[in-house]
Image (cartoon, rainbow, N blue to C red):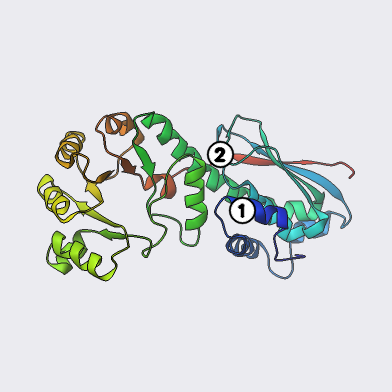
Amino acid sequence: MQSHKIKKELANQLIAGGLNPLDVSEVVLRALHEDSDESGDVTSIATIPVDQLSTLDLVARAPGTIAGIAVAASVFAILGGASVQIQARVRDGENVAVGTVILSITGPTRVLLQGERPALNLLSHLSAIATATRMWVVALGDSGTKVRDTRKTTPGLRTLEKYAVRCGGGHNHRMNLSDAALIKDNHVIAAGGVAQAYELIKARFPHVPVEVEVDSLDQLEQVLKVGADLVLLDNFTIEELRSAVLVNNGRAKLEASGGFTRDQAAAIATTGVDYVAVGAITHSAPILDIGADLRMESV
């Protein structure tokens, strides 16, 4: 491993996507350390000449929406430094067909094969999230209802996973517990009521956005009276969502939540809610099948 730093061009791409190159480097290094210790890739060391050069193409084996190209490229940049040349064939957020070459990396064969699996793991996972999100976006159509993620993310990968949601056309909920307040049922119990919890937060953190979770139309009325800007409608039926929109009458933004599946998207879109929160786009998206094909050629 020649460098822990990501090339400036890649770093700029990550920054443009709202990612911190140092954070991405840490993720990549952890992934690489999972694969080998100081002995390195013993299979490649034993079978491949140190000066052999080739090109590795990362290729879509299934259709989907791509996310994480610069993240996957960072694997090879960290492993090979100046010895590798990286060419992105598509952009994050693009839909690809089977057989589309996503990323090509030319350099020492040992480096390419050592980085193959970590790069594929990251690219396949992030593209899965982008693909699942895009499916929700398409299902919601032009209704105005937007799909949002949750904090149900893989520990250590939240920033990357929420980036993938954006690549798929979705919207991010709060990144962490300090970005915004979300009053849930346990906070209500601890504070002695919905209104009390809301007022306590506004008194302590007056400039922090506050979202309040409610599970009935009566609770919705209460939080609207205290001035809530965003209300999470927890486990409301489709008909209850329609009623909530009428009760709200434009006073607050409304977000539907409660384990909705994509086949309910069209119905949710007709209710008039502003957002639908879908934890499954990050915690349950099946990987997008992406493979790696090696080409032996001089450079």
Quick one: SS at disc 1? helix
Quick one: SS at disc 2? loop
Query: How many marks overall?
Result: 2
Which of the 4 quarters of the picture holds residue 34?
bottom right
Query: Where's residue 18, x and y in %?
Result: 54, 53
* Three-letter code, disc 1: Leu
Give yes or no for contact between labels 2 and 1 (Cβ–Cβ under 8 Å).
no
* Above or below, comparing residue 60 to residue 209 in the picture: above
* Three-letter code, disc 2: Gly
Query: Where's residue 240, x and y in %?
Result: 16, 38
User: Which residue is rendered at x = 65% and y = 41% of the image?
Assistant: 291
Which of the 4 quarters of the picture holds residue 78?
bottom right
Distance from disc 2 to disc 1, alpha carbons, whole Å, reads 14 Å
Q: Residues within 10 Å of mark 2 (few under 14, many from 20)?
A: many
Does residue 15 appear left or right of residue 194 in this picture?
A: right
- Quadrant for the N terminus, please: bottom right
User: Which residue is rendered at x = 63% and y = 54% of the image?
Assistant: 118
- Using the image as rendered, state which of residue 181 and residue 109 is in the foreground: 181
- Using the image as rendered, state which of residue 177 and residue 229 is in the foreground: 229
- Quadrant for the C terminus, please: top right
Q: Residues within 10 Å of mark 1 (few under 14, many from 20)?
A: many
Query: Where's residue 215, x and y in %?
Result: 17, 49
User: Which residue is rendered at x = 62% and y = 48% of the image?
Assistant: 120
Q: Which disc number belongs to residue 93? A: 2
Query: Where's residue 290, x and y in %?
Result: 61, 40
Q: Which residue is mark 1?
A: 14
* Above or below, comparing residue 139 to residue 4 in the picture: above
Dot 2 or dot 1, earlier in sequence: 1
User: Which residue is rendered at x = 64% and y = 64% of the image?
Assistant: 29
Q: Which disc number belongs to residue 296? A: none
